[in-house]
Amino acid sequence: MTNVNEAELRVLEAAVESWIGLWEVVWILRPLFPGQADSQILPFAQTVVRSMSDRGQVRVAQLEHRPADDGRSEIIENVLTGHDRQETISGRDAWDPPRSTQEPYVAIAATDAGEEAYQAVLRTR
């Protein structure tokens, strides 16, 4: 069985830096599952994200890139809560990368509690 703490640490390491797409969580966990397909890693990734979200270490949001007035792209965040969050994490579609930069996607980012948990682990190493 893969160590959940190691998996959570790897996810937090990326999530404290910026938003990461749910598909990226699977990619981050690949080294813990040598030789396994992403479809086999997905249930574990869903469990990890659900657990971290339930503990308030990550927030889950639908992100959408929209053109801004200055010609750049701005990110619109729609933070998911309650049933919507749980349903999204449990569903399969949210874990696929977007087909274009214009397509909304689901991502996670560390909360203050997640950053504190990450820093606490680093201090013990």
Image (cartoon, grey):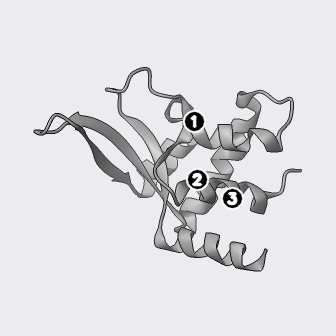
Compare residues 37 and 74 and report the one nearer the observer: 74
Instruction: Give amino acid for label 2.
Output: Ala
Q: What is the C-alpha distance between the residues marked 1 and 3?
A: 15 Å
Categorize mark 1 by other alpha carbons within 10 Å: few (<14), some (14-19), many (20+).
many
Q: Residue furthest right?
A: 1
**Residue 2 place in picture, x, y as percent:** 85, 51
Instruction: Give amino acid for label 1.
Output: Trp
**Residue 81 place in picture, x, y as percent:** 40, 57
User: Residue at the spot x=64%, y=46% of the render?
Assistant: 46
Do the CB atoms of the residues marked 1 and 3 lie less than 8 Å apart?
Answer: no
Do the CB atoms of the residues marked 2 and 3 lie less than 8 Å apart?
Answer: no
Residue to which mark 1 is pinned = 23
Q: What is the C-alpha distance between the residues marked 2 and 3?
A: 10 Å
User: Residue at the spot x=81%, y=44% of the render?
Assistant: 32
Categorize mark 2 by other alpha carbons within 10 Å: few (<14), some (14-19), many (20+).
some
Residue to which mark 2 is pinned = 14
